[in-house]
Image (spheres, rainbow, N blue to C red):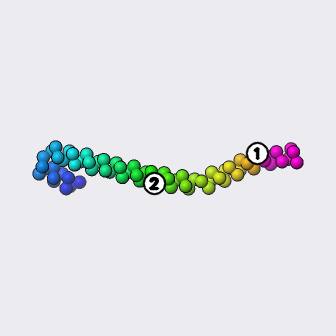
Amino acid sequence: MGLLLLGGVRKGTDEAVRLLAMSEAEAFEERRKAARVLGEEAETKMIFPMLLLMGVVFALLLVPAVGVFG
């Protein structure tokens, strides 16, 4: 950041604004990629609890059905 500001003093404000805009775009892209990776990891971690809950729902449906028809 300091190098960008120092370069802005040397080259003028137009160049500094362009460099800061490029830096902002790169930082935003990095944050977006990191958020995507964290989201994919969260999806993977949620598979087991979802399967467990699906088993509980099946048990809640099957136990009474087996009792009635059994």
Name the residue carrying label 1.
61
Q: Residue placed at 88% from the left, 48% from the top? A: 70
Q: Quadrant of residue 61?
A: top right
Magenta stretch? Answer: 60-70
Q: Earlier in the sequence, mark 2 or mark 1?
A: 2
Q: Crowding at label 1, few (<14), some or many (≥20) Cα neighbours within 10 Å?
A: few
The answer to whether residue 61 is magenta is yes
Q: Amino acid at mark 1?
A: Leu
Q: Which quadrant is the N terminus positioned in? A: bottom left
Q: Amino acid at mark 2?
A: Val
| Label of residue 26 in the image | none
**In the displayed structure, does residue 48 sit left or right of residue 10?**
right
Q: Residue placed at 12% from the left, 49% from the top? A: 11
Residue 18 lies, in percent from the top left, at: 21, 45
Label 2, label 1: how far apart the Cα atoms are = 37 Å
Residue 53 lies, in percent from the top left, at: 66, 50
Q: Main secondary structure of the magenta part?
A: helix
Name the residue carrying label 2.
37
Q: Crowding at label 2, few (<14), some or many (≥20) Cα neighbours within 10 Å?
A: few
Q: Secondary structure at mark 1?
A: helix
Instruction: Kindly report which numbered mark, 2 or 1, lies closer to the viewer in this rendering.
Output: 2
The answer to whether residue 14 is magenta is no
**In the displayed structure, does residue 26 sit left or right of residue 69?**
left
Q: Quadrant of residue 69?
A: top right
**In the displayed structure, does residue 11 sit left or right of residue 33?**
left
Dots 2 and 1: beta carbons under 8 Å?
no
Q: Secondary structure at mark 2?
A: helix
Q: Residue placed at 18% from the left, 47% from the top? A: 16
